[in-house]
Amino acid sequence: MTPEIPTSGDSLRHWLAWLRTQLAAHSDAPEQEAHWLLEEVLDSSTALWSHPQAPLGEARRGHLLALLARRVGGEPLPYCLGHWSFMELDLRIDRRALIPRPDTETLVRWALEHLPNKGAVLDLGTGCGAIILALAQARPDLDHWAVDRSEDALALARQNGAALGLPVRWCIGDWCQALPAEQRFSLVLSNPPYLAVDDAHLSELSAEPISALVAGETGLEAYQAILAGVVHHLEPQARIAFEHGHEQGPWLRQLLREHGWEEVETHRDLAGRERVSSAVWGTPYA
């Protein structure tokens, strides 16, 4: 149901205050979301601040009310806006892929510190392409590869890569099975599905693709599949890093060691929770 429009006036200042009120029961940051929604229909973040008394206008009013109706109806804000910022990249985002989250920046920042001098980098389960595109932006001299089993998600990632002018080799398929047999990588990254089928958080994530969230009965299935397959695609002393749930660190460290990885470490996110585990490949593939 579309909310009733404000009767106090049509100025941007009035609309901002009204939006904040409408979003109060649907957002943890209603003031910030009100700004984002209004800026989206203005096509500029400066118009709101430089001309707060300017009228919104009928055409923009309809657009704004449509966005608000989607938001108060439970749709995540990034899907309403159609784009989202990640590592200073403006990415197109919709229901075809997960919304990029600040937690994943922990993985990317680790990767930026461990990029090889040359060679190939792999992102498994790329979704909208956020991880690999952030790395391609930082180091365009490397050979960047990305895999996803969802044709819809990979189409979205391709669109983001084309819009940013960043070349990536996009591969459709199930983890490492999508890769050429002879291809080797110096760095492998993945933010795979890591929730169990009965995870309590799933009720809060119903708008996002469940195949990108749920790994299986334990939540570790994707890690197991990747570690079993990636061994055939590693350069000597290759590095690997996974994002994971904050309680999965011990299990993932054990899995990495069981599959022959050394120098296993876990890194914390900005909230101090275990979020990324990394390791070095100790056995050159023969």
Image (spheres, rainbow, N blue to C red):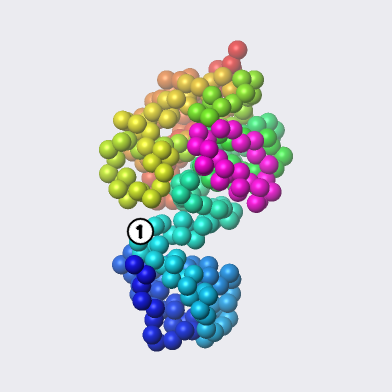
- For the point 54% across and 26% down, the residue is 176
**Residue lying furthest top:** 286
Count of labels in the image: 1
Percent of width and height locating residue 158: 61, 43
Q: Residues within 10 Å of mark 1 (few under 14, many from 20)?
A: some
Where the N terminus falls, by quadrant?
bottom left
Where the C terminus falls, by quadrant?
top right
Residue 63 visible at all: yes
| 22 versus 239 height, above or below | below
Q: Horizontal placement of 192 versus 185: left or right?
A: left
| 47 versus 133 height, above or below | below
> Which of the pair 285/202 is nearer the observer?
202
- For the point 44% across and 25% down, the residue is 225
> Which of the pair 102/126 is nearer the observer?
126
Give the magenta part as a residue range. Answer: 148-172
Q: Horizontal placement of 94 versus 271: left or right?
A: right
Q: Is residue 179 magenta?
A: no
**Residue lying furthest right:** 141
Residue 28 visible at all: no
State the residue position of label 1.
Answer: 74
- For the point 68% across and 31% down, the residue is 119
> Which of the pair 275/7 is nearer the observer?
7
| 199 versus 78 height, above or below | above
- Name the residue type under label 1: Gly
- For the point 52% across and 42% down, the residue is 153
Q: Horizontal placement of 66 versus 179: left or right?
A: left
Percent of width and height locating residue 238: 58, 27
Percent of width and height locating residue 73: 35, 61
Percent of width and height locating residue 83: 53, 57
> Which of the pair 104/217 is nearer the observer?
217
